[in-house]
Amino acid sequence: MIKENLKKQIFITGTDTEVGKTFISKLLAEAFLNVGYKVGYYKPIETGCDPICNDTFDLVQLTGQFYEEAILYQFKIPAAPLSADMKEKKGIDIDRLINHYYKLKDNYNIVIVEGAGGLLVPITKKNQKIYTYLDFVKMLKIPVLIVARATLGTINHTVLTVRALKEEGVDTKGIILNKYPKNPDWATETNGEIISLMTGINKIIKIPLIDGETPEDIKRKIMFLI
């Protein structure tokens, strides 16, 4: 049974761009909202938004937050945050990103933090150091849920992501093989098993390609990963 005073935080990372991090974040938010918890969504930096990013806007509407609470920096150019900031010069402040997370942590039962792309995507530069999302995760001391594509090529990307987290002592809660096809080929069928053998992670779930509303049992599967 879930306790009334439940407090959980999770960082959603991808193995690449366009693997469905925001989709999974939304399913996770819906699952906790449906059982009565206050959910805060946090995408510290969003790029490729002109004027806003619709998927993120929809998620913020779901949680009932102000858009400005969920996203601190927004850029028009579709690029890594550091690259976008070089162009638009908004001055991403890593300390501001961290402090805002702790405010959300105080105010919500569940905080879902979503990265951009993969772990080594650069966020900003400070005192000659380039900070990546992996650095950010370490500074937040937050566990990670990996969203990966289900099909050919995912073994390499996913195992590298897990190894990077392990080397830095970051807790990996599980792996989601997203957009799992209805009729998978042999490579897709065996990807999950091989990733588990190579990483030692047994919490690997497959989220199918679905038209329309995602069934509640799938949302609960994601919820219980964290």
Image (cartoon, rainbow, N blue to C red):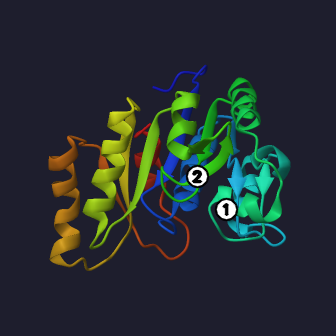
Residue 154, image quadrant: bottom left
Q: Is residue 72 left or right of residue 160?
A: right
Q: Horizontal and vertical percent for residue 16?
A: 45, 63
The residue where tag 1 is placed is 83
Residue farthest along the front direction in this orientation: 128
**Can you say whether 68 is above or below 187 in the image?**
above
| Marks 2 and 1, how far apart at CA | 8 Å
Q: Amino acid at mark 2?
A: Pro
Q: Is residue 209 visible?
A: yes
Q: Which is more toward the observer, 187 or 79?
A: 79
Q: Horizontal and vertical percent for residue 40?
A: 69, 40
Q: Is residue 58 visible?
A: no
Q: Which is more toward the observer, 29 or 36?
A: 29
| Residue at screen point 33% across, 60% down | 157
Q: Horizontal and vertical percent for residue 100?
A: 75, 33
**Can you say whether 184 is above or below 154 in the image?**
below
Disc 2 to disc 1: CB gap under 8 Å: yes
| Residue at screen point 44% across, 36% down | 226
Q: Amino acid at mark 1?
A: Ser
| Residue at screen point 33% across, 36% down | 166
Label 1, residues with CA under 10 Å away: few <14, some 14-19, many ≥20 = some
Q: Horizontal and vertical percent for residue 6?
A: 57, 24
The residue where tag 2 is placed is 122
